[in-house]
Every structure is written in C-alpha cells, then in structure tokens.
C-alpha cells in the first residue's frame, strides 16, 4: 500500500472517530481541521497535487469556521 493511501485512510479514520466521539459540532470541526492539517504537513511529499489542493481548500473552509467559533466563544465570555 502506498503512502498516499495510508495518509487518506488515516484522515478518513480520524474524521469518523472524531465524529463519533465529539460531543458538539464545533469540537468535531476543530478536530477535523487538526486532522487535515496533520495530513497536509506530513503527507506533503506523498500526496498528489490534486489531493493537496482539495485538502487545502477544505482546511481554509474549516479555518474560517474555526474563526467564527472562536469569535462566538469570545462574544459569550464578554457578554457574561
């Protein structure tokens, strides 16, 4: 099995496991972002250019959602 397949199997396992164990959607999205960033960093040399582009777009989208979650939590703390 090639390293590319191993990286994608890890990512699929990571997302399924985090989906099953996460108590809220915000935690799931944060953990999914962490998994994608891990795969992008470790698998940089093993993944095809196409796969890296798809993962980068997904990470940008999840980063935007993460920023919204953080802003929402900061607002809740400030509001009291």
Image (spheres, grey):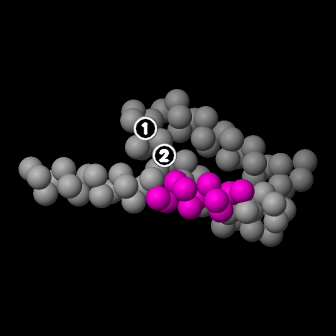
Query: To which residue does mark 1 refer?
Result: 25
Residue 76 at x, y percent in the picture: 18, 50
* Residue 33 coordinates in the image, percent (x, y): 54, 53
According to the picture, the residue beneath numbered tag 2 turns out to be: 29
Q: Tell me residue 66's x, y (percent).
A: 43, 55
Badge 1 element: helix
The residue most toward the left is 80
Q: Position of residue 64 (x, y in %)?
A: 47, 59
Kindly identify the residue that appears in the image at 75 percent across and 43 percent down.
9
> Depth check: 36 or 60 in front?
60
| Residue 53 horizontal side relative to residue 29, left or right | right
Quadrant hosting residue 16: top right
| Magenta range | 54-64
Circles 1 and 2: CB atoms closer than 8 Å = yes
Q: Is residue 7 left or right of residue 17?
A: right
Q: Is residue 67 magenta?
A: no
Residue 39 shows up from this direction: no
Q: Residue at x 90, y 48 (%)?
A: 1
Q: Is residue 14 visible?
A: yes
The dot on residue 80 is none
Picture residue at 58% right of the left edge, 58% below the top: 59
Residue at 72% across, 57% down: 54
């Amino acid at each position: 099995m090639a390293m590319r397949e191993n990286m994608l199997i890890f990512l699929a396992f990571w997302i399924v496991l985090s989906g099953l164990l996460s108590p809220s959607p915000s935690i799931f999205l944060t953990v999914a972002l962490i998994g994608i960033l891990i795969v992008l960093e470790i698998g940089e040399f093993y993944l095809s250019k196409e796969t890296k582009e798809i993962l980068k777009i997904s990470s940008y989208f999840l980063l935007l959602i993460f920023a919204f979650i953080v802003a929402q939590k900061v607002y809740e703390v400030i509001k009291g």
